[in-house]
Image (cartoon, rainbow, N blue to C red):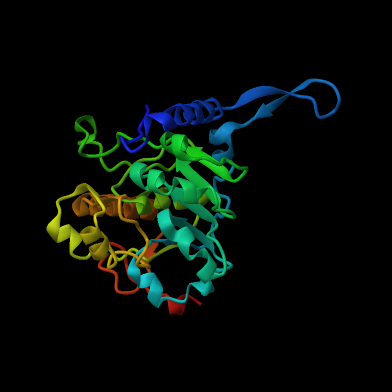
């Protein structure tokens, strides 16, 4: 499935298509010829799926932090997380310099956000970067730390055939990943796969300022007026840019997904806490961030 938006120009589409073809060809395990020893021999390439599979239980029993991008991050001392296992997403890389470290893992899935940031993403270095396979067309630089996951792009309640199934929660991130109207839900599936316990969520304020009151759920263009309202939604004023796209969330769908995540974690004897400041997300039990250190 080619998922790019109309913002990808016709001049860009050939290169975008070739990136998709390349990522798909490298998704599953393959055999290739290797001449590094002076003669040809076959070697196995695990593919993106196999490389993700190697992450299973990599941090089993360790605590981890899923970091959102809400304004509350500006009120927290994130330097405390330098030696922790962290999962960040979307524009969190804009805060790496201030934090003094990069997150352990970095994820993106939203089509418009990936497109809007496609030039910046080429400069993100350090974390293991995980995108949806359908995002591969916009990833201009694929290095050894770049992985593509099999995100079920149709796994959303607005898609008729998924209404009864939503929300799906994958316990096998290497096989499939489900949507939950927020990248945080994908990150919780990754945290589960990594074996993290407990998981602490921070920066997930679950509040989107006046935007959610003015616009219905769905994608909107970032006009100068919208840009001003967006300043209240993230940890820095210029998190987005005029001309880009912002998704007004389906809050009820998010909450359904969070409840499902908590159910799966607890069913496996694990726990998820909300350690954020001024968060309106009440589904997860609360803990004080500073008390964890």
Give the answer, above or below, for where 285 lies relative to 4.
below
- Residue 90 position within the rendered picture, expressed as x and y whole percent measured from the top left: 41, 53
| Residue lying furthest front | 11
Q: In the image, is 224 to the left or to the right of 54? A: left
Q: Residue at x 44, y 60 (%)?
A: 92
Q: Residue at x 30, y 46 (%)?
A: 180
Q: In the image, is 34 to the left or to the right of 282? A: right
Give the answer, above or below, for where 45 lies relative to 140.
above
| Residue lying furthest bottom | 291
Q: In the image, is 10 to the left or to the right of 257? A: right
The quadrant of the picture occupied by the N terminus is top left
| Badge count | 0
Q: In the image, is 163 to the left or to the right of 264? A: left
- Residue 243 position within the rendered picture, expressed as x and y whole percent measured from the top left: 30, 50
Q: Residue at x 59, y 67 (%)?
A: 83
Any part of residue 70 in sight? yes
């Amino acid at each position: 499935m080619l998922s790019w938006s109309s913002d990808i120009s016709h001049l860009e589409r050939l290169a975008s298509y070739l990136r998709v073809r390349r990522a798909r060809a490298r998704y599953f395990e393959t055999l290739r010829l290797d001449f590094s020893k002076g003669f040809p021999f076959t070697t196995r390439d695990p593919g993106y799926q196999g490389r993700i599979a190697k992450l299973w239980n990599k941090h089993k029993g360790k605590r981890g932090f899923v970091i959102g991008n809400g304004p509350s991050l500006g009120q927290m001392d994130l330097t405390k997380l330098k030696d922790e296992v962290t999962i960040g997403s979307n524009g969190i890389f804009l805060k790496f310099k201030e934090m003094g470290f990069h997150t352990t893992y970095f994820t993106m899935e939203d089509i418009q956000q990936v497109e809007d940031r496609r030039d910046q993403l080429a400069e993100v270095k350090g974390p293991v970067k995980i995108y949806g396979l359908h995002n591969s067309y916009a990833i201009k630089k694929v290095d050894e730390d770049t992985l593509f996951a099999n995100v079920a792009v149709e796994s959303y309640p607005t898609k008729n055939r998924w209404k009864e199934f939503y929300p799906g929660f994958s316990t096998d991130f290497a096989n499939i990943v489900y949507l939950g109207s927020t990248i945080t839900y994908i990150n919780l599936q990754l945290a589960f796969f990594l074996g993290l316990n407990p998981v602490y969520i921070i920066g997930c304020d679950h509040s989107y300022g006046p935007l959610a009151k003015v616009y219905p759920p769905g994608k909107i263009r970032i006009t100068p007026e919208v840009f001003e309202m967006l300043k209240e939604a993230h940890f820095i004023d210029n998190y987005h840019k005029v001309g880009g796209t912002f998704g007004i969330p389906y809050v009820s769908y998010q909450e359904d997904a969070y409840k499902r995540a908590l159910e799966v974690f607890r069913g496996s004897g694990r726990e998820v806490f909300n350690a954020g400041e001024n968060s309106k997300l009440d589904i997860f039990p609360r803990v004080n961030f500073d008390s964890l250190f």
